[in-house]
């Protein structure tokens, strides 16, 4: 049974590529694996009622299994696309596939991104219940035990190659769900229901014809009032089951990928992590999800250091936390949005840090081209948010270590490629090819006015984790073609511990945060062949050819790391560091 999917519609509007990757490509991978084994007797693909699109408000008969698929949002479009692959594998390879399309599911254990558990947890906390739009949208809700019974019937009685709707004729407006919740919690609906901005598009109604499934012997058994009471009882008995879900309880949560593939819902600054602006939650089609564990700081009687880190779900932010744990340094992750000064003040008052690390920022998914079409969001975080945090830190006498980028320069006549002449910290940025780089250069210039900021210019970050999709080596190893240009790069395994030492030393100003020297794409891939995969092959193409397949030009440069090398004489050259920290630990032969 294939339940796995990105399912939260709100997030699909902000990060549709991730939905395509998981819902379509992920399904394709699973189908191919099942085909190869040749041992699968049933492949039950769990889809959604949303593939039918919006049902007319006055329709008396619901969508039946042969109805046309007319998805209206990126989520439902990816589920429809996945269905096409399932159908194709059934017809082309004889895979014994069955597809289900279900209404909304609710019940115990459901992650609170979904409407009913969100309302329950908010009501338990005495907070308003947010409703998108005017609340007139109609939905059908099935209790999870009834849905489980439906899958059992389909597994044993369903016919291969068929589609089955799992639905209910009992419909409810969202506003009525909220009113029912208020009644059960003895809340005044007039003061407890809050109308918020609607989704970019919000289907008015989904209505299914479930007669085909009923003919197999299934029927809905749990009435709404009973199922709702059971669900409330479970959440009131298990209030901390999901840990910190404050981000999921906001009206418009966003989802992000945790380092190592663990997903988490957020609506704070984590929605714009350094290297991870948008990522989605990997949860089941019926809304059951696995939450990321809550990070706690390292206990200490009288800590001399305590770090407040912004960028919890980002690559660098996550690694910083692990280093702090290893070194026994107390730390906490910031919960406030960088753009909201009041939230940042609350963080500082609650955490009482000695230093602040900012690893939050928009780079774009799947790459910086995203920023070209999301300019206001990019400015909001990369410029306004960063300046806001710097200013709050200044008011509280705190040093802010700011992870910036060195992708604000490009080779020129004074710094030609291959010359060994790198850009220094005091040089004026000369690369404006991408909007992302423009915002980073802009904020770097403005941060010069703050004497409490240490700016670290990171470039093409690399770590020993060759499974991380943000790792520069992982990226180019997966490309069909690569350019071959020498660049300065940052080996995180060596340099992130140095960033913590810089905080201890209270270093300030701008620093080229790269290993000395340069390395080219081909040199890295040749090392990859030598240490990791001798059968690996790659193909080069020119910058002109690359320009045809990208939206924004890319920065290529060498940064002069002599200032950092002088402060930390043990710092290794880029090629030495690559071998010691990346390739030797991953050596396959």
Image (tube, rainbow, N blue to C red):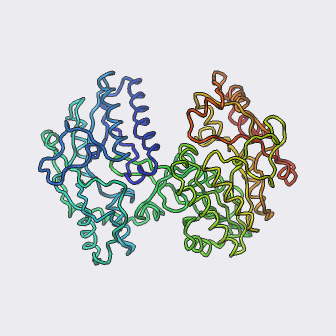
Figure quadrant of the N terminus? top left
Q: Position of residue 331 (x, y in %)?
A: 65, 64
Residue at 49%, 49% in the rendered image: 279
Comparing 371 with 179, the one in front is 371
Query: Left of 394 or right of it: where is 164?
Result: left
Question: Residue 29's quadrant in the figure?
Answer: top left
Comparing 134 with 243, the one in front is 134
Residue lying at the far front of the rendered structure: 413
Figure quadrant of the C terminus? top right
Question: Residue 134's quadrant in the figure?
Answer: bottom left
Query: Left of 75 or right of it: where is 331?
Result: right
Residue at 55%, 71% in the rendered image: 343
* Marker count (numbered): 0
Query: Left of 559 or right of it: where is 258?
Result: left
Residue at 18%, 44% in the rendered image: 63
Q: Position of residue 524 (x, y in %)?
A: 71, 32
Q: Position of residue 196 (x, y in %)?
A: 36, 66
């Amino acid at each position: 049974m294939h339940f796995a999917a990105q399912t939260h519609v709100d997030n699909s509007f902000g990060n549709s590529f991730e939905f395509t990757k998981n819902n379509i490509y992920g399904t394709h991978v699973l189908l191919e694996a099942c085909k190869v084994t040749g041992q699968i007797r049933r492949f039950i693909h769990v889809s959604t009622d949303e593939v039918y699109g919006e049902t007319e408000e006055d329709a008396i008969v619901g969508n039946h299994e042969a109805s046309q698929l007319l998805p209206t949002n990126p989520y439902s479009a990816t589920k429809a696309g996945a269905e096409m692959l399932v159908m194709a594998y059934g017809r082309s390879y004889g895979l014994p596939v069955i597809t289900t399309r279900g209404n909304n599911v609710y019940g115990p254990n459901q992650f609170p991104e979904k409407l009913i558990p969100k309302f329950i947890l908010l009501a338990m906390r005495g907070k308003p219940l947010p409703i998108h739009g005017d609340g007139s949208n109609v939905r059908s809700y099935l209790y999870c035990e009834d849905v489980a019974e439906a899958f059992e019937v389909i597994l044993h009685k369903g016919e291969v190659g068929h589609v089955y709707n799992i639905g209910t004729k009992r419909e409810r407006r969202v506003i009525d769900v909220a009113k029912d919740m208020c009644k059960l919690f003895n809340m005044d609906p007039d003061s407890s229901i809050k109308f918020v901005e609607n989704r970019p598009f919000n289907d008015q109604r989904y209505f299914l014809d479930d007669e085909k499934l009923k003919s197999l012997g299934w029927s809905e058994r749990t009435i709404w009032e009973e199922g709702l009471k059971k669900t409330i009882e479970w959440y009131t008995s298990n209030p901390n089951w999901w840990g910190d879900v404050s981000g999921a309880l906001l009206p418009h949560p966003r989802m992000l990928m945790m380092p190592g593939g663990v997903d988490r819902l957020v609506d704070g600054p984590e929605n714009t992590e350094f290297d991870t602006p948008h990522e989605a939650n990997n949860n089941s089609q019926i809304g059951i999800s696995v939450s990321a564990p809550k990070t706690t700081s390292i206990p200490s009687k009288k800590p001399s250091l305590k770090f407040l880190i912004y960028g919890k779900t980002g690559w660098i932010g996550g690694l910083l936390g692990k280093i702090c744990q290893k070194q026994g340094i107390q730390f906490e992750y910031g919960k406030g949005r960088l753009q909201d000064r009041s939230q940042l003040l609350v963080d500082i008052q609650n955490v009482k840090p000695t230093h602040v690390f900012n690893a939050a920022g928009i780079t774009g998914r799947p790459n910086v081209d995203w920023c070209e079409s999301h300019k206001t969001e990019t400015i909001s975080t990369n410029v306004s948010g960063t300046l806001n945090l710097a200013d709050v830190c200044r008011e509280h006498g705190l040093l802010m270590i700011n992870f910036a980028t060195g992708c604000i320069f490009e080779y020129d006549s004074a710094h030609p490629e291959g010359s060994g002449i790198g850009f220094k910290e005091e040089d004026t940025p000369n690369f404006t090819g991408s909007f992302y780089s423009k915002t980073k250069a802009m904020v770097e210039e403005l941060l010069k006015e703050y004497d409490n900021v240490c700016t670290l210019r990171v470039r093409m970050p690399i770590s020993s984790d060759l499974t991380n999709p943000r790792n520069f080596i992982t990226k180019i190893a997966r490309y069909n073609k690569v350019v071959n240009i020498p660049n300065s790069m940052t080996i995180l395994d060596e340099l992130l511990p140095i960033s913590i030492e810089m905080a201890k030393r209270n270093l300030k100003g701008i620093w080229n945060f790269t290993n000395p020297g340069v390395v080219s794409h081909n040199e890295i891939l040749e090392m990859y062949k030598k240490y990791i995969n001798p059968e690996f092959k790659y193909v080069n193409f020119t910058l002109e050819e690359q320009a045809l397949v990208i939206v924004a030009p890319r920065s290529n440069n060498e940064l002069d790391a002599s200032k950092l090398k002088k402060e930390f004489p043990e710092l290794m050259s880029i090629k030495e560091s690559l071998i010691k920290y990346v390739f030797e630990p991953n050596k396959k032969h």
